Amino acid sequence: MSLFSFDIDPHKVLGVGAAASLQEIRDAYKQQAKRYHPDAGGEEWAFRILAQAYEMLSAARVARAAAGPPTAATEAVRRPPATAAARGQRETEAVHSGILDAETHPGRLVAVEHLCVRYLWDDAEYLWLGQLAPDSERFLSCGLNLNWPDPLAPLRLDPAQCAQVADILRDLVDDLILSSRPAASRLRAEDDRVAAWLSYTSFDRSWRALGALHTLLRKQGLGLRQWSRDLFIPRSWR
């Protein structure tokens, strides 16, 4: 089952193949952004579609991880990457831990990444302007990337329980799509796994959707393991 609020092929938007590495995706995004960024004469709507395509392909890392045992990619969710100071460069990605319903059976935990593509401000700009700027000037897109079973869960449910949880999550995500009105969405549900992606035009809308999702999960006896990932891009391209 799949739901699409609009038809977008992120590989075509970025001009990369299905087997492209994360570095190749980032390089393609940066190259395209230099062309479509409003500072370079591009249209704001085109730049936002480009950012959403980048968001979708970044989210695919979690979907791939859910298909197999924990790997180095999923372990990255446990701990943030090295700080910019340690690497001697500006931070381009940051990961932060979030909600964890530790009392919930691991097989009933839903993994959700709150992914934001946001502008990278200079320190002075952020201090004096960034905190007062509206979401539209700080964020290009914010999305929720949902996967069940949690790829890091040490315990799984039996087939009958899996089918029951999958049915619950299918209906739950459908309801969330209707109630939170994401700019774009995608849902894939099978008997033993569910993956969904919902993209929003502002941080506040995505955060409210996350809160609504958590409430719905708890009502159904399910839990949440959530983390936040920020992908930073320059405010202007040279």
Image: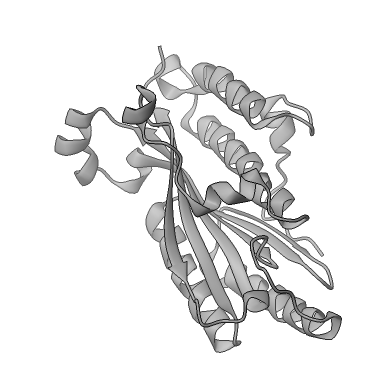
- Residue 200 visible in the snapshot: no
Q: Residue at x 21, y 44 (%)?
A: 131
Residue 82 in the image, given as x and y percentages of width and height? 42, 36
All told, the count of numbered labels is 0
Quadrant of the rendered image containing residue 153: bottom right
Q: Which quarter of the rendered picture does the C terminus lie within?
A: top left
Residue 12 in the image, given as x and y percentages of width and height? 74, 30
Q: Residue at x 73, y 26 (%)?
A: 16
Q: Residue at x 35, y 29 (%)?
A: 86
Q: Which quarter of the rendered picture does the N terminus lie within?
A: bottom right
Left or right: residue 38 versus residue 199 is left
Left or right: residue 119 versus residue 49 is left
Question: Between residues 220 and 8, which one lies in front from this camera angle?
Answer: 220
- Residue 49 visible in the snapshot: yes
Up/down of 51 relative to 108, above or below: above
Residue 61 in the image, given as x and y percentages of width and height? 66, 45
Up/down of 48 relative to 98, above or below: above
Color style of the picture = one colour
Q: Residue at x 61, y 41 (%)?
A: 58
Question: Which residue extends farthest top?
Answer: 238
Question: Between residues 187 and 159, which one lies in front from this camera angle?
Answer: 159
Question: Between residues 191 and 41, which one lies in front from this camera angle?
Answer: 191
Up/down of 90 relative to 205, above or below: above
Residue 91 in the image, given as x and y percentages of width and height? 38, 31
